[in-house]
Amino acid sequence: VAAALVALVPLSPGLTGSRVFYVRDLSLYFWGRYLWVRHEWLAGRFPLWDPYVGAGQSAVADAMHQLFLLPSMLVRLVGSDVLGFNLWVAVPFPLAAIGMWCFLSRRSSPLGSAVGAVAFTLCGPVYATGNFPNMSWAVAGMPWVLLTADRLAEGDHRLQQLLLAA
């Protein structure tokens, strides 16, 4: 929990819901997409077609909408437009910290795991993904994938190991 809270410290101004994160790609590409998808979901419609890009395009085929990433969609529906957007940007970092702590705690002390989780989450390459939610949500999943692979490698789970390798 401590590692997750430390990961949120640089993002704390955005967690108030009074101002939106606007760094580079967030304001240029993601704010408008976020608003459109959120308003479609809240109106009870599944956003199949995005009429705002060019002459329109399939929203389902565009990975920038993250329509099938359930944690991302749920976070985007929380609170006001601004708070939901800011949570969409911020939540991957505590998720990454918790996942890395779980991965490291299998072989390290709790304090060492917490330091490693904070170092992973706040390092430049990981934190730089914050202006592109697709990247930050993918990076947030990396420790969880490593944890799953580590657990599968331990036991005699030949079928799971085969599926993981495939």
Image: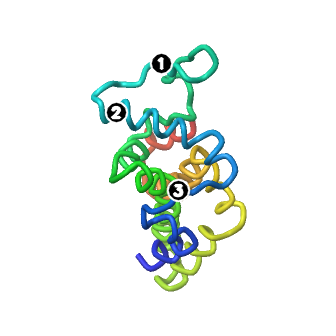
On the rendered structure, is 73 left or right of 140?
A: left
- How far from the left and from the top, in percent, is residue 18? 45, 63
Q: Which mark is residue 49?
A: 1
3D distance between C-alphas at marks 2 and 3: 20 Å
The answer to which quarter of the image holds residue 130 is bottom right
Q: In which quadrant is the N terminus drawn?
A: bottom left
Please tell me how many numbered marks the rendered image carries: 3
Q: Nearer the viewer, mark 1 or mark 3?
A: 3
Q: CA distance from mark 2 to mark 1?
A: 13 Å
Spatial CA span between label 1 and label 3: 26 Å
Q: Which is nearer the eye, 110 or 121?
A: 121
Q: Is residue 74 above or below residue 111?
A: above
Residue depicted at x 67% and y 46%: 25
Quarter of the image where the C terminus is located? top right
Q: Are marks 2 and 3 in contact (CB under 8 Å)?
A: no
Residue found at the far left of this picture: 44
Mark 2 lies on residue: 41
Of all residues, the one furthest to the front in this rendering is 18
Q: Label 2: how many residues lie within 10 Å, few (<14), some (14-19) or many (20+)?
A: some
Depth check, front residue: 96 or 107:
96
Residue 79 at x, y = what percent? Answer: 33, 53
Mark 2 or 3, closer to the camera: 3
Coloring basis for residues: rainbow
- Check disc 3 and report the residue beneath it: 20
- Of marks 1 and 3, which one's residue comes earlier in the chain? 3
Q: Amino acid at mark 3?
A: Val
Is 139 drawn above or below residue 28 in the view shown? below
What is the secondary structure assignment of the residue under circle 1? strand
Q: Secondary structure at mark 2?
A: helix
Q: Is residue 90 left or right of residue 26?
A: left
Q: Answer with mark 2 or mark 3, whichever residue precedes in sequence.
A: 3
Secondary element under disc 3, as helix, strand or loop, is loop
